[in-house]
Amino acid sequence: MLGQRLGKFGLRIAEGKSRIIGFGRSEWEKAQREGTKVATFDFLGFTHYCDTTRRGKFKLGRKTSSKKFRQKMKAVNQWLKRVRNQVTLAEWWKVFRLKLIGHYRYYG
């Protein structure tokens, strides 16, 4: 059903990356009763998980996916190695600052 709906827009589900998990308030309450954990999932560079507020109520938590964070750090490291001897520190620092601002705006 979802596959047909996405097909109308020329999209398809990646079977290797997709799975059905129990998630949300009801799953969180069930896990609290049974003493288990609720599954997490990664979507758009974030890891989504069930969390609690300060008062102990359900809350959806999001944090940067560790996989994406490692990829970004590796890419920045490679970029720094490429430019460090080709341009002055003042020049590449401006570009690095823009890269950081982009990261903060997306993940912040």
Image: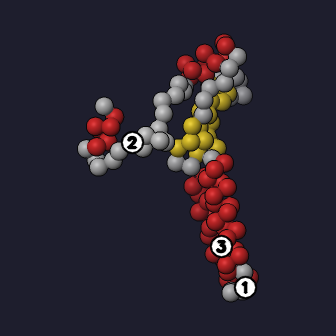
Q: Is residue 50 above or below residue 16?
A: above
Judged from this view, the residue extending furthest toward the front is 16
Q: Are marks 3 and 1 in contact (CB under 8 Å)?
A: no
> Could you tell me residue 87's position as x and y percent?
68, 86
Task: Please name the residue that numbered disc 2 is placed on.
Answer: 13
At x 70%, y 74%, the residue is 80
Displayed quadrant of residue 12:
top left
Q: Is residue 76 above or below residue 58?
A: below
Q: Earlier in the sequence, mark 3 or mark 2?
A: 2
Which amino acid type is marked by label 1? Asn
Q: Secondary structure at mark 3?
A: helix
Say which of 90 and 73 sits in front.
73
Which amino acid type is marked by label 2? Ile
Judged from this view, the residue extending furthest toward the top is 33
In the rendered view of the protein, which quadrant contains the N terminus? top left
Q: Is residue 32 above or below residue 38?
A: above
Say which of 9 and 97 sits in front.
9
At x 65%, y 54%, the residue is 69
Which-is-in-front pick, marks 1 and 2?
A: 2
Q: In whole angstroms, how far apart are the C-alphas of marks 3 and 1?
A: 11 Å
Q: In whole angstroms, how far apart are the C-alphas of marks 1 and 2?
A: 44 Å
Determine if residue 74 is in view.
yes
Determine if residue 108 is in view.
no
Q: Which mark is residue 11?
A: none
Task: Please name the residue that numbered disc 1 is placed on.
Answer: 85
> Could you tell me residue 96's position as x and y percent?
66, 72
Q: Which mark is residue 79?
A: 3
Q: Secondary structure at mark 2?
A: loop
Q: Earlier in the sequence, mark 3 or mark 1?
A: 3
